[in-house]
Image: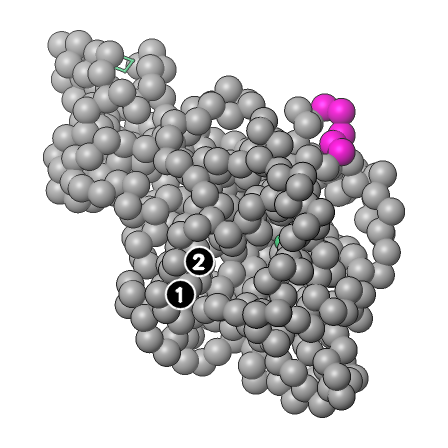
Amino acid sequence: MARTNQLDTLSQVGPGTKIGALFRSVWLPGLLSAQLPRPGCAPVRLKLLGEELVAFRNGKGELGVVQANCAHRLAPLFYGRVEDSGIRCAYHGWLYDKTGQCLEMQNEPDKSVCAKVKIKAYKAVEKADIVWVYMGEGEPPALPKFPWMGLPKSQRNATVWIQESSWLQGMEGELDSSHVSILHTNPATMATSPVHQQYSATDLSPKLYARNTPIGILAIARRNAEQSFYWRVSQFMVPAFSSIPSANFPVGGRAYVPIDDYNAYTWDFNYYTKGDLPQAFLDYVGKGLAFPPESTYQSYKLNTGSIIDTYVPVRTAENNYLIDREGQSLSSPTGIHGLNDQDRAMQEGMQSVQDSQGRIVDRNKEFLVAADIAIVRARRRLLEIVKDDASLAEFQRTIKDGTAYAVKPLDVVSEFGELDDFVTEHAEQLSPQREFA
Ligand code: FES
Ligand SMILES: [Fe+2]
C-alpha cells in the first residue's frame, strides 16, 4: 500500500502539485451551457483546481473563462458588465476579452497602457451542452470521446452539483462495488426491481477484481446469479472519469472535478444510444432518487471562503441529509432519500485529517479489506501516472486523440465464472469503442 504522505498528495490539486498537473492535462467539464444561456447574460463564478474564475458569454456568443478578479485593484469581475467584446470591471471600467487581454481602461488617459495588461484566461469550448475548460499550457488534447458526446440532445443528459469533500472521496465511491448491495438497497422496492439489481442485493460480498487499462482500471464485480454469474464492470479513467453499468436505466458515468482540495463538482452523464431517453428515466431522475440529487441553483460560499454559482443539494450534512429514522428501519438501510444523497452522507462525513478543514479522509486510519481492491488499485494507478514527468507525458500521449475515453460500461449475466474467461469473452466490449472514436 502506498505511504500516507503519497496518499495525501492525491487530494492536492492547486498549481504546482502533481495531481494538479494531471488535471491540467485534460479538458474538464466546467459548467453546463445552460448556466450561460444567452449572449451577454450574467457571468458565472467558477472555481477549478483551486483557481477562482469567472465564465461569461460575450455579446457575440463567444465563451470566456478568465481569472475572477480584475488586474487593477482586484475587484470581482463577477459584478462587471458583459459586453460584445468581453467583460468590463464595474469598479473603474477595465474591459477584458476572452483571452484575458485588457482592451480598455476607462480611468487611464494613456491609451497604450492597457496593451500591457493581460489576466489569466483558459481555453473553453462547448460540446454536448457542456462548457469544457482546458487549464494546461500549450496545445490541448482532443476532447474525450465519451460515447454520449456526439448523440442528439434528446438521447443524453448531463447534470452537475457540489460535493463537499475531496474529489477523491467521490471518485473512490465509483469503484466501491460492494457498497451498492448495502448502502443503496431498498427492500421495499426489491420485488419490482430488474433482475440484475436483485442479484446485487442478494449477493452482498461479490468477488472483486481490478485490471489496469491504458488510462485507468477496470473494477470488476462477480456476483452469484443462480446457475451463472452476474458480472458488473466499472471503468475508472484517469484523472476522474467513470463509466458505470446501470441495468435499470440508460448507461452513463460520472466525473469528480476538483473545485479545490476540499470540494468537488460531481458530474453525471447518462445516455441512451437506441433513442430518446425514456420518460420513466427522466421521471425517476427528476425526483432526485439517483443522480443528480434534488438541488437548487444558487450562489454558494465554500468553506474556503470563495463564492461560486452552482447546484447545491437540498440534503446536506447541515440537515443530516434529512434522514428518516423510521424509514431507515422499514424500507431502506439509510432512510436517506436518493442514491447520491446516500453516497454524500458517507463520503462527506468520513473522518478527516486534522488540517484538512474536515474534507480529506485520513487514509492512514483505514482498515481496508478484499472489497477495496479497486480503490487501492486506482490510488496506485494515479500515483504511477504522476510519478515523474515521463509517466505524465506518456499519459498525455495516450489521451491525445480522445479515443481512450470511448468506453462503455458493461454488466452481464454470464456462464463464465473465471475472470480470464470473462475478460476474453468480452474483450471487445471492454475496449474503446470504434463507433465513438
Ligand atoms: S478594480 Fe477593476 S477596473 Fe479597477
Ligand atoms: Fe453509491
Residue 220 location, quadrant: bottom right
**Residue 58: within the magenta?**
no
Q: What kind of residue is marked 2? A: Tyr
User: Which residue in the structure is indicated by mark 1?
Assistant: 280
- Please state which of residues 334 and 213 is positioned toward the viewer in this rendering: 334
- What is the span of residues highlighted in magenta in the rendered image? 351-355
Q: Is residue 89 above or below residue 254?
A: above
User: Which residue in the structure is indicated by mark 2?
Assistant: 284
Direction from residue 62 to residue 187 in the image, left or right: right
Taking the spot 23% from the left edge, 31% from the top edge, the residue there is 42
Q: What kind of residue is marked 1? A: Ala
* Whether label 1 touches label 2, CB < 8 Å: yes
Q: Position of residue 351 (x, y in %)?
A: 76, 33
How many numbered marks, from 0 up? 2
Residue 349 location, quadrant: top right
Q: Quadrant of the C terminus?
A: bottom left
Taking the spot 61% from the left edge, 76% from the top edge, the residue there is 195
Direction from residue 115 to residue 121 in the image, left or right: right
Q: Residues within 10 Å of mark 2 (few under 14, many from 20)?
A: few
Q: Element under label 2?
A: helix
Q: Position of residue 205 (x, y in %)?
A: 80, 65
The image's mark for residue 109 is none
Q: Is residue 226 above or below residue 16?
A: below
Q: Residues within 10 Å of mark 1 (few under 14, many from 20)?
A: few
Q: Element under label 1?
A: helix
- Please state which of residues 74 and 317 is positioned toward the viewer in this rendering: 317
Main secondary structure of the magenta stretch? loop
Give the distance between the C-alpha atoms of the residues marked 1 and 2, in whole angstroms. Answer: 6 Å
Q: Quadrant of ligand 1?
A: top left
